[in-house]
Structures are given as structure tokens and as C-alpha cells.
Amino acid sequence: MVFRNSLYNLLGLGLPLIVAVVAIPELILSLGVEQFGILTIVWAIVSYFGLFDLGLGRAMTQQVAATVSEGAFDRLGRIVGTSNLLMAILGLVGGILLLLTAPLIARELGSPVDRQSITWAFYWMALAMPAIILTSGYRGILEALGRFGIVNAIRLPMGIFTYGGPLLVVWSGAEGLAPIAAVLCGGRILACLVHALYAKRALPPSMGPRRVDRSLISSLLRMGGWLSVSNVVSPLMNYVDRFLIAFAISASAVAYYATPQELVMRVGIIPTALASVLFPLFAAHATGTGVSLFAHIRRYSLVVLAVMLPFTVFLVLLARPLLAAWISPEFAQMASLPLQIMAVAALFSGLAQVPYTMLQGRARADLTAKLHLVELPIYLILLYVLLINFGVVGAAAAWLIRIAFDMFGMYLLCKMAFREDTPAEPEEPLSETGRTPLGS
């Protein structure tokens, strides 16, 4: 069911935040504000390059869900085999690019004393890049088959490890970012292997042989093309601000910006938990006779609003005392206003998830991609102007304006793309076996 699987996602995404609440102040204290700011950039690169798959992860989810719903199991093995090969190649390309650019990134971000450690940190993340990208494909298979319980049974310990791993490294007495990155690299490779094992078990026994089909390559790349634009550009707009702050102001300023941003983005797990369940549901029905799309949009938008609004009000009203108690009064003085601005942005971002997922699930990723391509240059100019004039507060304001524009644009695109009088179809997500529909 939609809400049961959303609850699985919420637990898998949310419980690691308890570790984050404990780990982040300790990491800031142990690493210092500057090195912690660079660590947040490492986290951002791991998150961003996980989407460096040309949309193939989501394209595979859509294709697997549609194929299983049609019972065309003989085609399933060719889709999985071809997609996995393409993502492995892309992972190697991404790793090589990061390997080559690591010294340049370190020179721009760190002091001469820290550059070697920062360079090696990015070398370790380059090594993990194929595993990071392949993981998105294996997770897509599990989600397409409705195995959200398994997905989150893996996601939960890995989410804890993202924050707990660096903390254990710091407590062990190791210095610099390189040991932290090495531990994170090992964790990502292990996560990929576990996802691969469970994806293999979840695929139906009647599936055709898993092999590469050259005839599918062009169609998968074409399908993933528009998906990849949003999958690359949208996270880029979420993380490019940290790099600009580091280059324009300092790595220390990144910490005052990235910490509240990480906090509100973690609150965003609520709509994300719902959206990842809705995507394969809509994808499985993408060739159907039609769905009452506006009824779905209204229903799930109200759910997101009802859940997100209390968090937004709480963060806006209590930003300064919350940060003072969590980290320090000095940190709160610098980061409380950005947190208040970003809390409002998180509400808009959550609401945008519903029409965004609808458009992509209904094979209209071209519309979301075109909107993001329009947003990107406008946002970069706005971010630069507000950052130069108002510092991290200006960067937060630019983020809010961009997300508000994105939300209104997504709803407008849904209204333009789909007719409100489309006849309704029953809402039936795939069961845990991926074979029998369940009522929602």
C-alpha cells in the first residue's frame, strides 16, 4: 500500500537523523568549522554523483514496473542486464572524472596544509563512484517490484553509517578527511553488494536471461535522457551554492549554510518517502487508459502540507534556540536566519514533489527537464548576486526563491499536460512480490 510503503521509506530515511543530531556537533568540534564545511561538500558529491547515471536508474524503475505489470517477464532480463552494464560504464567515467579533478578541487577548497588530505578524500570517493551509481539501479529494481521493506532495511544502517562512520573515525584519533572518506567508500561498496544480492532474489524466476540487448541501449538512453536532465540539474541547484560560498567567502561559511540546509533537507524526507512510492505506481500505469491525475495531486499535496507545515512553523519560530542548544550560541547567531528561510523553502520543495513525480511517472520528464533548464541560469545569477551582497543569508534567500518558482512551475505543468476530466483508474501499487496488485 502507498502509505505503508511510505512509512517504510520514512523510517529508513528518518531514523539516521537521530545519529546525525549527535554526530554533527561532535564533528564540528573535532574537525573544526572549515574541515567540517569540506566534509559537507564530500557528502554533497556522494549524493550528487549518485545521480550521474543519465537517468538510467529511474528509467529502469519505470521499465521494470511497466514490464512486470504487463507480465512480459521474458523482456525483463534484457532490461536489467543492459541497464546494469550502462550504469557500470557511467560509474567508471564518473570515478575517473572525480579522480582527475580531485587536486584542483583540493587546491580551491583547502589551505596548503590540508590539501593532501582533501585530495585523498576525493580519491576515495572516486573509487566508490561505480558502486554508488550501480546502487541506484539495484534500488530501482527493488522499488519497481514494491520491495520497499527491503530497500529501507538496507537504507537504515547505511544512513546511520553516513554520520556514524565519520564520528567513529574521529573518535579513533585519525586526523584529516582522508580516513573519513575511506570509511565512507567502504560503506558504499558494501551497500552496492547488498542491494545487488537482494535485487537478484526479488526478480521473478520466470524472468528471461539477464543479458545485454543492443537494441535496448538507444531506447533506455533516450528514455533516461530527459530524466537525467532533472536528475542532474535539480541536485546541482541544491549543492552548487556550497561550492560558490566556499570559493566566494570561505569554507567556514559553508558550515553556517550547509548545516541548516542539511537539517531542512532531512525534513524533506517526508515528501521524498511518499514520492518514491508513487513513482513506480504511476510508471506501472503509464500506458493505461488514464488516471484521475488531479485527484491524486490534490490528495497527496494535502498530505504533504498537513505533515510539513508543523515542522516549518517549528523551525521558523525556534531556529535560534534550537541551533544554540544543538551546536553553540555563536553558531546559532550565524546560522539561525538561513535556517528560517530554508524551512519555508523545504515546505515548497515538499509540495513540488507531488506534481514532479506525477510528470515523470507519466513519461513527461521532458517537461520537468525543460523547467529545470530554465531555472538553472536564472538561479545561478540570482545566487551570485545575493551571495555577494548578503552572504549566506542571501544564498538562502536565492534558494527559497528558486524552490518557490519550481513548485508553482510543476503544478502549472501538470495542469497544462493533463486533462482534469480524465477518467479514473483504480490506484493499485505492486505487491511485495511484484506480481499481484494490492489495493491502496
Image (cartoon, rainbow, N blue to C red):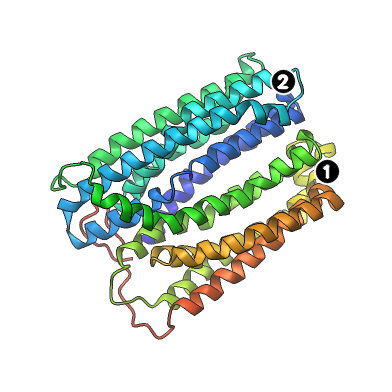
Q: Amino acid at mark 2?
A: Asp
Quarter of the view holding residue 104: top right
Q: What is the x, y in percent for residue 349?
A: 60, 60
Question: Neighbour class for label 2 at 10 Å: few (<14), some, many (≥20)?
Answer: some
Q: What is the x, y in percent for residue 323?
A: 76, 43
Q: Amino acid at mark 1?
A: Met
Q: Nearer the viewer, residue 305 or 60?
A: 60
Residue placed at 52% from the left, 23% from the top? 183
Is residue 218 left or right of 116 when viewed as pictured? left
- In front: mark 2 or mark 1? 2
Residue placed at 46% from the left, 65% from the top? 366
Do residues under tags 2 and 1 come within 8 Å of each other at their CB atoms? no
Q: Is residue 376 above or below residue 198?
A: below
Query: Label 2 vs label 1: CA separation?
Result: 25 Å
Question: Neighbour class for label 1 at 10 Å: few (<14), some, many (≥20)?
Answer: some
Question: Which circle's residue, 2 or 1, is located before the other in the chain?
Answer: 2
Residue placed at 23% from the left, 42% from the top? 212
The dot on residue 186 is none
- Where is the C terminus found, in terms of image quarters? bottom left
Q: Nearer the viewer, residue 383 or 189?
A: 383
- Where is the N terminus found, in terms of image quarters? bottom left
Is residue 124 left or right of 29 when viewed as pictured? left
Residue assigned mark 1: 334
* Residue at the far left in the pictured view: 206
Q: Nearer the viewer, residue 404 or 413?
A: 413
Residue assigned mark 2: 114
Is residue 110 left or right of 422 when viewed as pictured? right
